[in-house]
Image (cartoon, rainbow, N blue to C red):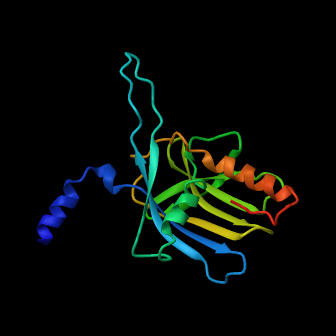
Amino acid sequence: MIRLALLLFLSLPAAAQEGLRYHMQVWMRGETTPMETRFRLVATEGTTSHNRVKKPRMGGWRLEADRTQGTPYAQALLLGRAERLLYLAGPSPQTHAEPIALRFGTRSLPVWSLEMPKGLRASTVLVEVAPGLLALCDLSARFERGDLARIELHLESLDGAHFLVPAEAGTVLLGTLRAWAQEARQEPEDGGTIR
């Protein structure tokens, strides 16, 4: 039985075993214990066209929760939030290469910073997981009002990056940061809620 399971695992396409593993914690206002989950970001293949000229296509991603860890019954909620907090794309005007690297196992990955919108109490670190491909490494954000008090999202391991491609929604984090900053600048009329 063990041989059969091992054979099935080894026969899976390499891409099915690859991904970025994250740990996410979310503190709601007034709570001392965070909701948390661990999940894997798995790249999905880009669409292909039937044109003669095959232009490079953007891929996508899906998130797979580790159901054995984390807050019971909260993983769907946390994964829905995590989808808006990820970055898997090439450099953008808001990113800047830094003269340092972070080690993940045997790999040393170049670090990139990401400019934060004014008024936002957040910090991020991106790493270059493949040539010209940046992925979120760390995100930490605190909120002064609303139901959400704090979010922490950290890359724990790389199971491989050679299958990763820029995602079509790869810069969704930038839009989320802008929305958070806009909400932080606005006076709440009804107590305000942070997404």
The residue lying furthest to the top in this view is: 52
Camera sees residue 115: no
The residue lying furthest to the right in this view is: 187
Front one among 49 and 91:
49
In the displayed structure image, the side of residue 13 where residue 70 appears, left or right: right
Camera sees residue 123: yes
Tag count:
0
Front one among 26 and 101:
26
In the displayed structure image, the side of residue 118 where residue 29 appears, left or right: left
Q: Quadrant of residue 100?
A: bottom right
Residue 115: percent from left, percent from top: 74, 50
Q: Quadrant of the C terminus?
A: bottom right
The residue lying furthest to the front in this view is: 190
Front one among 194 and 166:
194
Q: Quadrant of the N terminus?
A: bottom left
What residue sits 67% from the left and 74% below the top?
28
Residue 181: percent from left, percent from top: 78, 54
Residue 155: percent from left, percent from top: 53, 63
Q: Quadrant of residue 126?
A: bottom right
Is residue 100 positioned above or below 38 on the image?
above
What residue sits 41% from the left and 17% below the top?
53
Front one among 107 and 26:
26
Residue 109: percent from left, percent from top: 53, 55
